[in-house]
Image (tube, rainbow, N blue to C red):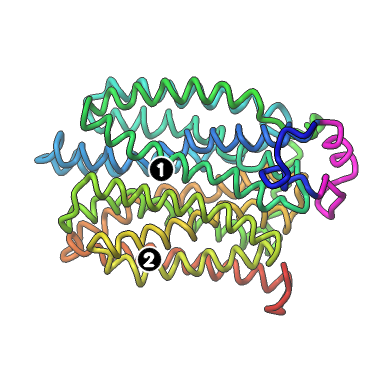
Amino acid sequence: MEPFDEKGIATLAADDVSTADTTSPSTTDEIKEHPRYTRYLVIASCFTIQGLSCGVVHSWGVQQEYLANNVYKDEPKKIETLSYIGTLMFFSLYLWGMPAGWIAEVWSYRNLCFIGVVIMAVGQVLASFCSEPWQLCITQGIVFGVGIGLVFGPTSTAPAGWFTKRRGLATGITVAGVGVGGLVIAPLTEFLVRTTSVAWSQRITAIYILVLGTISCWFVRVPTQNTHRSFRSFNWREFKNRRFAVHAAMVFFVTAAYIVPYTYLPEFWVTHGISSQTASVLIAVANVASSVGRIVTGFSADYIGVLNSLVLSLGIACVSCLLVWPFATNIGVGVVMGLFYGFTAGGYWSVAPLAAAKLFGIEKLASNTGTFYTVSAVGAWLGNPVGNAILSGPGHGTQFLGMSIYIGVLWFSAFVMAVVNRASYSKRLIDIV
């Protein structure tokens, strides 16, 4: 008997996995050998791991704000060092994308994710014993970041192989875990920091990452595991492919822009008289919008086309940074900013891997997506430090205008790259691509 009601998530399987252009017959046959609920467990496990890993990254701004305004209030150099921690987590996430994708494809998605979960927990425990920002850079930034890098790519791409017609919805639900994780972890972190300490909030985080992550890792798998491939089979000449290079540039620009608002919006709101507790709630609103945006954008990609959905998401994210952020100095406009940015920026993460599958095939989705992430690691490194440097300039410390323009330009550049690839696929605006 089917364990899910037809009106629920079982609608994902309504296609019953028919053959598609990007799914080989052998892969389709392999999928049919497993019960339908196997696919749902894959989605649920990847959803959970995404939430645990990226939720902590999105919640770092809460800890950074507390440390900057309380522990290191009169030490500007240490405050500056704190700004590198979010960047290091983000940088490590992307830097390990290529090896993580290849290891997952040629070895084991499950085992690789388990190693990543353990490293994340160890990073949090080590961070809890740190007393200086530079120590946090190593533990919270690099060690924890390596753990995220090992789980992020595999859990982003594993569910796509189990679906064809509703691949967008399946991927959207999976990556919505990032937003849900931020929604739960940001207020939880703020509560733990205020009632205990930053150190104990990190130790408690390590515990639930290890417990929930280990359970989830058991169900991470793909229909087929290609053991005949190796690192030597990577073809660097793919970068000579115009679409491949343009897609890599798009990921680079998004990577540089994406995390900066999540890191600095709490500080922006506190600077304009909004309490830190309310700022935490506004970030939670952005995370809710991100989760909804990932699901809706993935769902829409199944109907209006993956590349069309990608262009729309990037364009609206650009508008939110250039036209909404500068005026989000009160709770009302802050909610609008959180909704717009969270929804569209989050939606990007649903369709980015799907666009890679459409443009370059699903057989190498994990390794190709990992390659794009690794290439864009420099963007992850530049994002927050450049934003902080702009914020330190005359006149920007209260309005954050320079930072919002900087992020808006990055999103616009990504939008242009997406338009170029969409046009290379079809120049007709009404085509579903």
Residue 321 numbered tag: 2
Q: Secondary structure at mark 1?
A: helix
Mark 1: amino acid: Leu
- CA distance for labels 1 and 2: 21 Å
Q: What residue appears at the point 82 percent right and 31 percent down from the top-left corner?
A: 34
Quadrant in the picture for residue 152? top right
- Across and down, in percent, residue 289 comes to 45, 54
Dominant SS type (magenta): loop
- Across and down, in percent, residue 60 comes to 33, 39
**Side of 145 relative to 310 (left or right):** left
Mark 2: amino acid: Cys
Location of the N terminus by quadrant is: top right
Residue 183 numbered tag: 1
Q: What residue appears at the point 42 percent right and 20 percent down from the top-left corner?
A: 207
Quadrant in the picture for residue 74? top left
Q: What residue appears at the point 58 percent right and 57 percent down from the top-left corner?
A: 296
Extent of the magenta region: 15-34
Relative height, residue 138 to residue 84 (above, below): above
Q: What residue appears at the point 33 percent right and 34 percent down from the top-left corner?
A: 188
Q: Secondary structure at mark 2?
A: helix
Frontmost of labels 1 and 2 is 1
